[in-house]
Image (tube, rainbow, N blue to C red):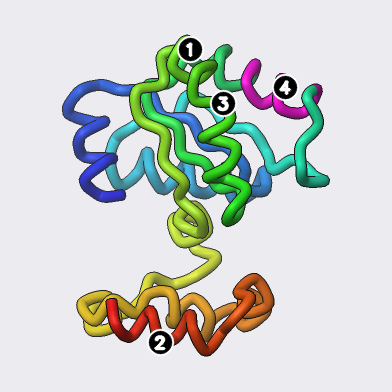
Amino acid sequence: MHEVFAYAAREHMKVFLLGAKTEINHEAQQAIRRCYGIEVEGYSPRYEPYPYSSETAEAMLQAIQRARPQILLAALGAPKQELWLDDHQPELARIGVRLAIAVGGTLDMLAGVYRKAPSLICSMGLEGVWRLLLDPKRLRRFPNPIRFFWLTLLS
């Protein structure tokens, strides 16, 4: 994300946050402004329940269209964020979104809800394990936790 924010600052690109809780979006917006000098053009809160209705998807797209960002950071949770971005790629392109990224818990980290993994853990590629240690309830998202840990260790 550091590289994305540095690029956005250099190119004067607008950023939009999609999906986290309102207070998380607000805190992440402040952190992005403070650390990178970027103004986040807007954010839209998480919508429930999933799968989203056509009215909910339309409300999300309208919020994005009002802000007209070039970069969209989707924090809807996996696999919702990936599916939503894939389903709405044509509309996002028409709006002018040039880069849409599924960011998962990145906004939580920017907002200070979770600490970033120590450098050693990052260098080993074990940030997913770090997140599970901080928030064990995430484990239920994985259909086969043993396979997840094995694949994490192999990566």
Magenta stretch, main secondary structure class = helix
Label 2–label 3 contact, CB within 8 A: no
Residue 4 vs residue 113, the one in the foreground: 4
- Give the residue type that dot 3 points to: His
Of helix, strand and loop, which one carries label 4? helix
- Give the residue type that dot 4 points to: Ala
Give the alpha-carbon distance from disc 4 to disc 3, as whole Å. Answer: 12 Å
The residue under label 2 is: 150
Q: Is residue 78 left or right of residue 46?
A: left
Question: Where is residue 85 drawn, in percent x and y?
Answer: 53, 35
Residue span colored magenta:
55-62
- Give the residue type that dot 1 points to: Ile
Other-residue count near label 3 (Cα within 10 Å), few / some / many at <14 / 14–19 / ≥20: few
Residue 98 vs residue 67, the one in the foreground: 98
The residue under label 1 is: 95
Give the alpha-carbon distance from disc 3 to disc 1, as whole Å. Answer: 11 Å
The residue under label 3 is: 88
Give the alpha-carbon distance from disc 1 to disc 2, as whole Å. Answer: 40 Å
The residue under label 4 is: 59
Q: Earlier in the sequence, mark 2 or mark 3?
A: 3
Give the alpha-carbon distance from disc 4 to disc 1, as whole Å. Answer: 14 Å
Compared with 38, 13 (above or below) is above
Q: Viewer-nearest of labels 3 and 1?
A: 3
Label 4–label 3 contact, CB within 8 A: no
Query: Residue 69's quadrant in the figure?
Result: top left
Question: Where is residue 126 drawn, in percent x and y?
Answer: 34, 79
Give the alpha-carbon distance from disc 4 to disc 2, as whole Å. Answer: 40 Å
